[in-house]
Image (spheres, rainbow, N blue to C red):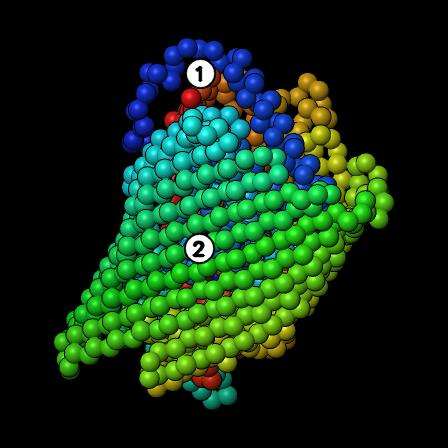
Amino acid sequence: MPHTTTYFFSAAAHLGTYRTLAMLPALGLTLSFAGLNQAVYAQQTVQQVEVNATATARSGRDDTAAKVLIPHEEIVRYGDHQLLDVLRRQPGITIAEGKGKQPELRLRGLGNGYTQILVNGQEMPAGFQLDSIAPELVESIEIVRVAGADQTAGSMAGSIHIKLRQKKTAAETEWRASSSLQNGRLGSQFSVQSNGALAAAPDWRYLLAVQIDSSSVEQNQTSQQLVQNQTQNGNQALWQNSIDSRLQLQQHNRRDSITLTPSLQWQPDQQRQWRWQLFLNYARPETTKQESEQAGTGMPATSEFPLNHSIWAAHILTAHQELQWEQRLNDSAKLSMQWGWNHFARDSRFRFWGSNPAAGLSEQRVVFADAKENSWRWAGKYLAPYSEQHVLSLGWDSSLAQRVESRDEWDTPSLGQSQQSAHRYEASMRKLAGYIQDEWTLHAQWSAYLGLRWEQFAAHSEEAGQFDIRQQNAVWSPVLQTLWKADSHTQWRLAVNRTLKQPALAKLIPRRFRVDNNNNPFNPDQLGNPGLRPERAWGLDLGYERTLGEDSQISVSAYRKWVQDLMLEHLSLQQGGWESQTQNHGKAVIDGLELEGKFALKEFWENSPAIRLRSSLGYNWSRLSAVAGPDNRLPDQARLSARLGLDYTINPAWKMGLDASYLSSERYRDTAGMLSLSGPRRHLDAYLSFSAQAHSQWRLSVNNLLQQDLRNADYFQLSERRWTEQTTQASSRQWRLSWEGKW
């Protein structure tokens, strides 16, 4: 099997040519420089941020369960447009990109169902995208590597908890206006938040947030595809090219959205509290693609339609609503309940035009695809400190999700008869869980957490007259976490838990979802598998933490996971072309090592600049029992990741920051005969902020300053025939200027 060339995975990262910032948020340009009272205000602001960040870091350090808490001040520091860019800079988190796919969030190098994302403690419906939540709407983010018994066991790599803003102590209104430029395309965003107490009822507090967003991104991708046949020349085997073509893809993505996030809190006394919150997002995304293929001299094209054009557009409505009740009882006990409702509706239209001038063929395909999902959740928890050393918790969690999808397709070829198909799928998922946990303080230096969770999953999917699939699984998930404080600066952590990974409902439907064009080993049709079983795993985590100062610390953690019933893709060639089906194949062992450090220079050198440094290093690897080596690893697992960032307070009015990250090149095999590679990736973000007055500031930020192209390669061999595909996806930097303030 051939190896990639040095040129293709060149390590050089180029800076490119700077473009002129074409659009400025002109609203109140002169007002922002009025009333220069910056010295006092800026000093107060810096002190407040430091106190909040320190308090947040301490709360995570003292917990028996290992977690990373990211406060609101850090979330909005770089002025990011998407929450995904905020998470990219957090320790242990990487983003998988390339080959035209949507960016995927990964924790400990694992995504694709291994990492769980919760919004206010609830799972979001299939199709939900993180870019529908603006960073300004998030109060905090919690990264949990080992879930407790009160959380679902479906977080093998860990979970990311996103907590939306609900209330603030002081009544105020915040606003932000921003403009962006990326690859010649302009974008804009405006958000406003207001909170306070109702005049007629002071024990009622409210928060209302509104955001309007419009973005446009241009993407270009080039692929080189090669198909070779093996021939014999005496005793020597030779490979002869049968297909050699170059594909050029131009893609334009546009998204317009509006988000509404109101919340209410009623606290009639110190014992009772009610909270209600709604997250409502309406979006209209549109993707336009143009693809052209140029075949080698005297060779056929790889795809059926070398020239093709497609448009996909949708209306998407996402709603998340929850009601929380909390009652404090005698002896410091507490009873709480949550009621939640999620709604997701997508109405999409897809049109494809394809032509093959050499063969005199053309085809037009129209697809109407709709999806609607509703889910309901009821959970409760009773917490009681029944002694000075023990805090006991009992609880339950139940949910029901129902999803309906319809797909109507019309194919009109230039030769032959038109074809029409219509399908309607219905699926549901029921979850029921109960748990008990005990937080045990053995003595001042040693605390432990013991928990046991029982969780049952019941999935049902059907299409009238075609299939009716029912699947039920249950798992007992014990959890042990312990924290040993050797002294006031040093502590050790140990955790053992059992988790699982449920297959997505779409993977259970025995239907063939065909690609529009260019069916090959790297772009096969997808076939569901109703017999797919969930993955189950045991995990072991060990951590060491040392505090070097008030805002400085280092930590080292290692983990191992033993996975059974691993879900891998099985590739095969059928009469209708290449198809891939997810199947359970053997076991896997996953290992990792993570290092993290945070340093405030003034704690080591009194006369140093006001600089805070943060760094992280992660190394992950895995071994698959059902795939022959070498490189038999989980797909797209980030093997080596490194990050270095700094924040510098130049003076009370000016602040700046940099964040650089690196992902190593990867080689992995997760399917027999297949080898996949990706080049190294470097990412650099920066920001500069200026506070001209007490209640407003300007912020200039740039994302992906290096704009390094994403490079991937795939090789597949079957008997005496092999396929090669090398892909380069262009990358572009994004400039953003924002004006924000409060009153």
Relative placement, left or right, of 189 versus 394 is left
Relative placement, left or right, of 670 versus 588 is left
Three-letter amino acid code at the position of disc 1: Gln
Image point 50% across, 68% down: which residue?
430
Relative placement, left or right, of 81 versus 661 is left
Q: What residue is pinned by disc 2?
A: 341
Image point 50% across, 62% down: which residue?
399
Q: Report, in whole angstroms, how far the alpha carbon at label 2 lies from the one at label 1.
A: 42 Å
Residue 437 seen from this side: yes
For the C terminus, give its image quadrant. Answer: top left
Q: What residue is pinned by disc 1?
A: 693
Three-letter amino acid code at the position of disc 2: Trp
Among the 4 quarters of the image, the one containing residue 634: bottom right
Image point 69% across, 59% down: which residue?
436
Q: Choose between 104 and 694: the one closer to the eye.
A: 694
Among the 4 quarters of the image, the one containing residue 696: top left
- Using a 10 Å C-alpha cutoff, classify the residue at mark 2 as few (fewer than 14 neighbours), some (14 to 19) or many (20 or more): many
